[in-house]
Image (tube, rainbow, N blue to C red):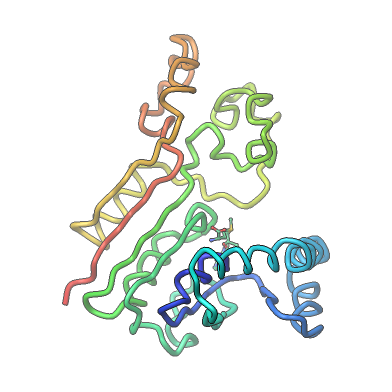
């Protein structure tokens, strides 16, 4: 939703999410979210819409100088569904399809990549950024996102004797680098791949002692040190 603020200045934005995401103040969508996604998700969204989003919207308006941002139309659907194009009328017409931090959560990533391709018009492009499971915080334990990552065992989710100390906060498909590559090789040949490593090589590289490297010998350094894996591709005309 946040990114719709800048993409929506000059573009019409459509969003697809499995969760019902209320944005305004009608009571119906909130009750629907409670019913479909449970009380926890309802309370988190209400809190965010009350406390964080209004100031964020003002900050976006100030930063971009835009006085009108087109609100995205949101479809509530499963992006893994092979028949999603039948329900989202604008499928196949998009100039760009973008996704951040979603593909690592999808139980059927291959069908989802097919859907990215199908959603685009010829000449359109996709950009997918996903959080790689094999990175040090790829486990999505909340402590990894709240400044407590260094209290957790390094790459604990990949090490048998530490797995039970890690608590993923969401479903993860655990797809590895080579599996992602084989999906994109098959469906979108000619794609561009970026391995975003941030500070990981400087900070975590030295923590990979010879003993730890031996323990993690099934994983390449790229797998251990890449945080976000990015794929970009243009659909042929
Ligand atoms: C970690 S959030 C990322 C949200 C946003 N892209 C961002 O970067 O802040 C993952 C999102 O993926 C959605 N999601 C998970 N599985 C999905 C599916 N099968 N189809 C559509 N959306 C899904 C979740 O509902 C959630 O909103």
Is any atom of residue 72 visible in this view?
A: no
Q: Quadrant of residue 150?
A: top right
Q: Foreground: 107 or 169?
A: 169
Q: Quadrant of residue 60?
A: bottom right
On screen, residue 32 versus residue 118, left or right, reads right
Q: Foreground: 29 or 59?
A: 59
Residue at x 54%, y 30% (from the top left corner): 158
Residue at x 74%, y 65% (from the top left corner): 45
Residue at x 70%, y 76% (from the top left corner): 22
Q: Foreground: 237 or 23?
A: 23
Q: Residue 58's spot in the image, x, y percent?
A: 63, 68
On screen, residue 54 versus residue 201, left or right, reads right
On screen, residue 22 versus residue 129, left or right, reads right
Q: How many marks?
A: 0
Is any atom of residue 23 visible in this view?
A: yes
The residue lying furthest to the top in this view is 210
Quadrant the N terminus occupies: bottom right
- Residue 213, compared with residue 126, is above or below; it is above
Q: Residue 24's spot in the image, x, y percent?
A: 71, 80
- Residue 107, compared with residue 228, is above or below; it is below
Q: Residue 230's spot in the image, x, y percent?
A: 36, 50
- Residue 195, compared with residue 237, is above or below; it is above
Q: Residue 219's spot in the image, x, y percent?
A: 40, 28
Q: Foreground: 110 or 23?
A: 23
Quadrant the C terminus occupies: bottom left
Quarter of image, ligand 1: bottom right
């Amino acid at each position: 939703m946040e990114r719709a603020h800048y993409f929506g200045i000059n573009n019409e934005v459509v969003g697809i999410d499995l969760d019902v995401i209320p944005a305004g103040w009608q009571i119906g969508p909130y009750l629907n979210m409670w019913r479909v996604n449970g009380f926890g998700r309802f309370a988190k969204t209400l809190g965010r819409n009350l406390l964080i989003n209004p100031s964020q919207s003002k900050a976006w308006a100030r930063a971009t100088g835009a006085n009108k941002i087109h609100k995205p139309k949101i479809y509530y659907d499963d992006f893994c569904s092979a028949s999603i194009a039948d329900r989202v009328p604008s499928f196949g017409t998009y100039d760009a399809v973008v996704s951040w931090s979603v593909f690592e959560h999808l139980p059927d990533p291959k069908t989802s990549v097919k859907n990215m391709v199908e959603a685009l018009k010829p000449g359109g492009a996709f950009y997918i950024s996903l959080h790689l499971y094999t990175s040090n915080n790829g486990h999505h334990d909340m402590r990894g996102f709240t400044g407590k990552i260094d209290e957790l065992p390094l790459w604990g989710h990949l090490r048998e004797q530490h797995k039970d100390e890690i608590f993923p906060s969401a479903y993860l498909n655990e797809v590895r680098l080579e599996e992602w590559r084989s999906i994109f090789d098959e469906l979108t040949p000619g794609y561009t791949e970026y391995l975003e490593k941030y500070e990981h090589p400087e900070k975590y590289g030295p923590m990979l002692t010879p003993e730890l490297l031996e323990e993690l010998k099934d994983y390449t350094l790229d797998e251990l040190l890449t945080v976000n894996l990015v794929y970009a591709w243009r659909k042929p005309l």
